[in-house]
Amino acid sequence: MKVKKLIIHHSLTFDGKVVDWTAIRKYHIETNGWADIGYQYGIELVGDKYVVQKGRSEHTPGAHCLGQNDKSIGICVVGNYDLAEPANAALNLLAELCADICRRYRLTSGDIETHHKYAAYKTCPGTRFPMDRLRAKVKQILGV
Ligand SMILES: [Zn+2]
């Protein structure tokens, strides 16, 4: 797989419920019949700390964005960001993860995109998700 971009998601489901990483994985495997969770990474609050959850291998196309799965890494921030912005701690951890991936695949903050860009009928990763701030943080970490 040739990684050319990162695609950011939130975990809001069709019925408006937010589910955790384990529940998303279970749903993708048991209900959708997929080999594994559709995303490569997740950001989730566990206890009182945000952690990076690992999903599919970076070498395996995900199942998260129609037409982009074989050229992108999908990252899901657990939560509903139509309702509120993600916590700063979540955004900082996401920026660290994105910067690390960008460095390894020689990408820039401009290669971080929303699911919405490819699925206009969805708001994913949420109307309140601060993409500009995420890109600025990544740009700062990368120094380019
Ligand atoms: Zn999405």
Image (spheres, rainbow, N blue to C red):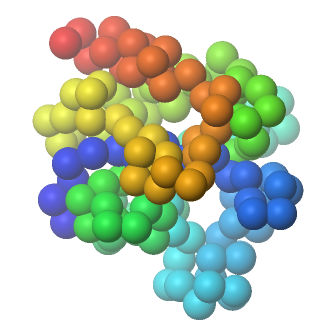
Q: Residue, x 30% and y 55% (percent of image)?
A: 72
* Vertical comparison of 132 with 94: above or below: above
Query: Quick one: 34 or 81, which is closer to the camera?
Result: 81
Query: Quick one: 78 or 68, which is closer to the camera?
Result: 68
What is the quadrant of residue 25 in the picture?
bottom right
Q: Residue, x 18% and y 42% (percent of image)?
A: 105
* Vertical comparison of 133 with 128: above or below: above
Q: Residue, x 26% and y 67% (percent of image)?
A: 70
What is the quadrant of residue 65 in the picture?
bottom left
* Vertical comparison of 86 with 133: above or below: below
Position of residue 53 in the picture relative to residue 69 (left or right): right
Rendering coords of residue 83 (x, y %) = 80, 33
* Vertical comparison of 31 with 128: above or below: below
Would residue 115 be seen by someone viewing this image from the given angle? yes
Rendering coords of residue 78 (x, y %) = 69, 46
Image quadrant holding the C terminus, namely top left
Q: Residue, x 85% and y 56% (percent of image)?
A: 17
Image quadrant holding the N terminus, namely bottom left
Rendering coords of residue 41 (x, y %) = 50, 52
Which residue of the protein is positioned furthest toward the front in this rendering? Answer: 121
Position of residue 81 in the picture relative to residue 136 (left or right): right
Rendering coords of residue 98 (x, y %) = 39, 34
Q: How many marks?
A: 0
Would residue 54 be seen by someone viewing this image from the given angle? no
